């Protein structure tokens, strides 16, 4: 992975909430590999993986706290002595939020408020948090630009927009340096293919390799700005270490700036696996937008963000990872 910072971080303490999860564990790995003074993970392992946590046991500067962000005391303890926070802990998935809006609200809004308050009380240098492209809702224009959002389409989207509103208030009221990252369909190694709310790429890869029925919601013509996880790591690192005052208090698209259809994605995976396997089409999924494409100008201008992995490169790396795990 490329290096996304020039600052000496050997004396800095980083807190990554949700650090046992998919994106969080990649951020942790980057910081540890690049000499961070201390990297603390807060995770309750409800959706994160103990295998991801075990990857970091070799590093003396790594610390793990098993705890729930819905517990204010846990959040306060996790922020003690911390310089930078990357808040990734959340309950993802639009369908999960539709099925159980209360739990999504309690974790994604209540837990977020606990964490940002604890970070403010600990006087951290910056607080970067995971938002989502779901905040664009039914806004029809492409590409998506940060200043223009539509009607929200799911409880999950409501939780992420609420995070952004809270972050804006904390920036204005308490002068907390906050940066929100609107992820666009992040994918890569260590993304969980199991469970009812698994993401589409690991589902496709694992289903094709196992010769199981693979479903495509709708006709597959819907498009997404698929974003390799290395790009999400870059945005978090640049966000945490940002020194431009005008960059704080804002939310940024984190994507590549190119979109591909779900059917194109499926066929690309099938080609990489060199396996013949036809998908099964079914009804479109409630709460989903049809097309997604990000304008990344704002992140490039204020954070210096430039995607280092395009879709096809990242997909090849991801398929190789799942093939190695399948052996």
Image (cartoon, grey):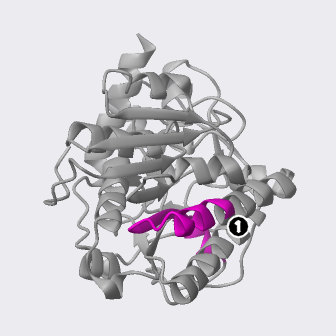
Where is residue 240? Give x, y as percent: 35, 64
Determine the image quadrant of residue 153: bottom right
Judge the density around disc 1: few (<14), some (14-19), many (≥20) Cα neighbours within 10 Å: many
Q: Residue at x 44, y 22 (%)?
A: 54
Where is residue 206? Give x, y as percent: 52, 26
The magenta stretch spans residue 121: yes
Relative vertical location of residue 90 with respect to residue 158 in this rendering, above or below: above
- Front residue of 113/222: it is 113
Residue matched to label 1: 159
Q: Residue at x 72, y 36 (%)?
A: 196
Q: Residue at x 43, y 65 (%)?
A: 124
Q: Which residues are magenta?
A: 114-137
> Could you tell me which quadrant the C terminus lies in?
top left
> Could you tell me which quadrant the N terminus lies in?
top left
Where is residue 112? Give x, y as percent: 65, 62
Relative vertical location of residue 306 with respect to residue 219 in this rendering, above or below: below
Secondary structure category for the residue under label 1: helix
- Front residue of 292/239: it is 239
Q: Residue at x 71, y 82 (%)?
A: 151
The magenta stretch spans residue 8: no
Where is residue 245? Give x, y as percent: 32, 85
Question: In the shown orientation, is residue 42 left or right of residue 254?
Answer: right
Q: Is residue 132 visible?
A: no
- Front residue of 185/301: it is 301
Please state the total of marks drawn on the protein image.
1
Q: Is residue 244 visible?
A: yes
- Front residue of 194/248: it is 248
């Amino acid at each position: 992975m490329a290096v996304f910072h020039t600052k000496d971080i050997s004396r800095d303490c980083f807190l990554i909430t949700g650090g046992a999860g998919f994106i969080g564990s990649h951020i942790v790995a980057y910081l540890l590999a690049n000499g961070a003074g201390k990297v603390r993970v807060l995770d309750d392992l409800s959706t994160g993986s103990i295998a991801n946590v075990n990857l970091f046991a070799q590093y003396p500067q790594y610390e793990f706290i098993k705890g729930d962000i819905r517990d204010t005391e846990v959040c306060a303890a996790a922020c003690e002595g911390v310089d930078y926070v990357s808040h990734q802990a959340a309950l993802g998935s639009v369908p999960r939020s539709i099925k159980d809006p209360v739990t999504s609200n309690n974790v994604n809004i209540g837990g977020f408020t606990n964490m940002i308050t604890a970070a403010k009380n600990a006087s951290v240098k910056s607080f970067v948090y995971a938002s989502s492209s779901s905040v664009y809702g039914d806004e029809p224009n492409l590409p998506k630009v940060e200043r223009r959002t539509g009607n929200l389409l799911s409880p999950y989207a409501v939780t992420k927009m609420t995070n952004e509103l809270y972050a804006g208030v904390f920036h204005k009221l308490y002068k907390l340096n906050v940066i929100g990252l609107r992820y666009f369909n992040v994918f890569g190694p260590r993304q969980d293919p199991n469970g009812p709310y698994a993401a589409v790429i690991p589902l496709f890869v694992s289903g094709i390799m196992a010769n199981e029925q693979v479903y495509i919601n709708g006709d597959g013509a819907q498009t997404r700005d698929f974003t390799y996880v290395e790009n999400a790591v870059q945005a978090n690192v640049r966000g945490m270490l940002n020194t431009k005052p005008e960059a704080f208090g804002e939310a940024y698209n984190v994507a590549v700036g190119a979109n591909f259809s779900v059917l194109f994605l499926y066929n690309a995976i099938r080609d990489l696996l060199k396996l013949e396997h036809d998908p099964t089409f079914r009804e479109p999924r409630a709460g989903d937008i049809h097309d997604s494409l990000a304008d990344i100008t704002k992140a490039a201008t204020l954070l210096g963000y430039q995607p280092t992995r395009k879709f096809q490169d990242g997909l090849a790396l991801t398929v190789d990872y799942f093939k190695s795990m399948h052996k």
